[in-house]
Image (spheres, rainbow, N blue to C red):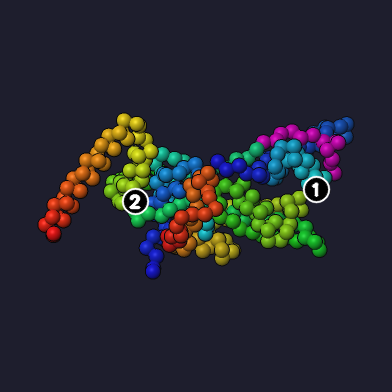
Amino acid sequence: MPFKRYVEIGRVALVNYGKDYGRLVVIVDVLDMNRVLVDAPNMVRGQMNLKRLSLTDIKVDIEKAPKKKALIEAMEAADVKNKWENSSWGRKLIVQKRRAALNDFDRFKIMLAKIKKSGAVKQELSKLKKQAA
Amino acid sequence: MVQYRFHQYQVVGRALPNEAVEHPKIYRMKLWATNEVRAKSKFWYFLRKLKKVKKSNGQVLAINEIYEKKPTEIKNYGIWLRYQSRTGYHNMYKEYRDTTLNGAVEHMYNEMASRHRVRAPCIQIIKTATVPDELCKRESTKQFHSADIKFPMVFKKVRPPTRKLKTTYKAKKPNLFM
């Protein structure tokens, strides 16, 4: 299987370990085989080990080590935020966050909604069974 | 930021004034040490070898830590060093790509320890410099100079996001493809 996601200037990655866990960052320059210079709109540009990054499919069109303003403009142009939130990976993370932030009343509402949904599914199933029989 | 073991200090000192010499020459040195006390000690060690002055008849006028001017830019650092091996003294030139000089020096100490079994007290840094891309000598730094550098991550290291979630056994085999 050939590789589709490369470590390159402009690749968007997700931090999967450490203090900045869960943040989307852009690879802005490559230090050496293990480390990259990484930047995001709300953080100071810094180096990060590639072991802490999961590459995504999104790529931003920038030159090596752009200024912060240029980086933010390029991220707007590539529509990183929307692409991420509409991708299946991004959506899963959003759902995880919402589930972690539920309070008891929300969980009660979810319980009712699940019961209703499974009731509707079972009704349809029994209808189809009757037709088949 | 990262905690570096070695800090860069600027130490300024001179011999004490006496009747023969009213205003002795002032010497300034940039060196690496883990703390200020050690920096002053190293200053006298090197100055003794160069000039006829000792700590007992000299004074340190100033000691300041030198910080990195642009820690968000990647630079190529060349480090010239003199180290003591089991059989004698040797000179060496090493290159590192890093954002800060302290980081490159720390990298150098670790690399000397691992590759040549040379401990920190046996290393003397002669000179450090920021080397522009064209003048780099080592292939391993030159290969990262291209503007459209691109390589895949061949092996995905699967690890839990916090040490708390670490267990000896997991339910599923990990997916190692990036």
Q: Position of residue B87 (x, y in %)?
A: 81, 63
Q: Is B129 one of the magenta-colored residues?
A: no
The answer to whether residue A77 shows anywhere in this view is no
For image coordinates 33% across by 47% down, the residue present is: A92
- Horizontal placement of A13 versus B53: left or right? left
Tell me the number on the disc at residue B50.
Answer: 1
Q: Position of residue A118 (x, y in %)?
A: 23, 45
- Horizontal placement of A34 versus A7: left or right? right
Q: Position of residue B4 (x, y in %)?
A: 62, 44
In the orientation shown, which residue stands out farthest toward the front? Answer: A133
- Amino acid marked by disc 1: Leu
Looking at the image, is A79 positioned above or below residue B144? above
Q: Residues within 10 Å of mark 2 (few under 14, many from 20)?
A: few
- Amino acid marked by disc 2: Trp
For image coordinates 36% across by 43% down, the residue present is: A96
In the orientation shown, which residue stands out farthest toward the left? Answer: A131
Report in which chain the residue with disc 2 lies: A
In the orientation shown, which residue stands out farthest toward the bottom? Answer: A1
Report in which chain the residue with disc 1 lies: B
For image coordinates 53% across by 44% down, the residue present is: B164
Looking at the image, is B54 positioned above or below residue B155? above
Tell me the number on the disc at residue A89.
Answer: 2
For image coordinates 52% across by 56% down, the residue present is: A34
Secondary structure beneath disc 2?
A: helix
Query: Which residues, given as a range, are shown in magenta?
Result: B52-64
| Marker count (numbered) | 2
Q: CA distance from mark 1 to mark 2?
A: 63 Å
Looking at the image, is A41 positioned above or below residue B95? above
